[in-house]
Amino acid sequence: MSNVKTAGGESDAMKKASTMSLVRAILPIVGLIVICILFNTLTGGRLLSNLSLALSQVYVIMIASTGVFFIMTMGGLDFSQGSIIGMASIVVCMLSKTSIPLAIIGGIATGAAIGAFNGYFYVYRKIKSFIVTICTMFLFRGLIKYLTTNAPVAGSAKLINYDSTALKVICTVLVVAIGFAAFRCTRFGTDLKAIGAGEKAAKFAGIRTDRMKFLIYVLAGAITGFAAFISVIKVGSVTSSGGNQLETQILIALVLGGMPISGGAKVRFENIIVGSLLFIILNSGLTMMGFSTQMLQLIEGVVFLVFVAVFADRESLSVIK
């Protein structure tokens, strides 16, 4: 009799887990559709009529989110993305006066170098990722303000010529497609999820976890360094606020897309795409309705907390590194 009860309890638990998994998969997509309809109605159709303008903000977030997605999949966090894109943007502007291709390479190299800085202290000095990246955020944010004290850092006039929707769409699709292929079709994604689910078990499985974690921070930095080029071509210069709050926007976007904040086996690459679109639509809709910046941040914060409550894997929250 007890065996029957045990089997019944296990069956109920499996059904509940399956239902929650389905809810977590569908909720972000449903949320995106509902928010589009809601804000389009509340703004009198202005949201869809100005959709191309709203989506012009999604490219940088979606590209940078790809790198952060890899970090969060293995259970880490990165709060330095805004400072990375700010520093990389300054380098892009400076080098653009010599050569645009060189500027792109310089931006990627700058992002990778800061990512390596984060990875070194996180992996080899055993400092928690959120502590390391918060320190990096303040360190390079101060350097950005110093470099832009007298005036914005201006790039070559040729940068503006690259500000086309076609180029930004191609670059974004290329980064996302390569990331998707690597994550879903190679051992790369499997190893990342294994580290996020349990680092000790991943080591026993033969994964070189320290090397993988270090390279992921370098990769994430390089991807954000490339996003700096997409950011710079819009205005052709960088101010002291360059990249400000990007890390917060990325974190909100990924969580809105259904990303478990502790990473692991439950992550889906689609979290990047759905989350980035959901964040931009939410932000644009609230702005069109005339909400102040403070009220906008309050509403986004409430939505963020709701999604964290839904998608957080409470059994794994203690493994955030």
Image: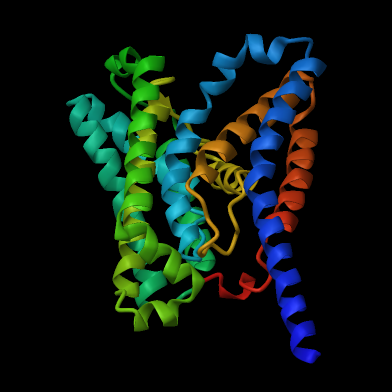
> Is residue 276 depicted above or below 13 in this figure?
above
**Quadrant housing residue 308:** bottom right
Q: Which residue: 22% across, 24% down?
A: 97
Q: Quadrant of residue 96?
A: top left
Residue 263 in sight from this viewpoint: yes
168 sits left or right of 286 in the view: left
Chosen colour scheme:
rainbow
In the image, 182 versus 20, the foreground residue is 20
Count how many numbered circles sit on residues in the image: 0
Q: Position of residue 182 (x, y in %)?
A: 32, 49
Q: Give coordinates of residue 68: x percent, y percent.
A: 46, 51
Residue 41 drawn at (x, y percent): 80, 16
Q: Is residue 118 above or below residue 67?
A: below
In this rendering, the answer to whether 262 lies above or below 250 is: below
Q: Residue at x 72, y 50 (%)?
A: 307
Question: What residue is at 51 percent from the left and 51 percent from the top?
Answer: 268
The residue lying toward the viewer, choosing from 54 and 115, is: 54
Examine the rendered structure and indicate whether residue 236 appears above or below residue 277.
Answer: above
Which residue sits at x=34%, y=41%?
225
Residue pushed farthest bottom? 2
Give percent across and percent down for residue 293: 74, 32
**Quadrant for the N terminus in the image:** bottom right
- Tell me, yes or no, if residue 89 can be seen here: no
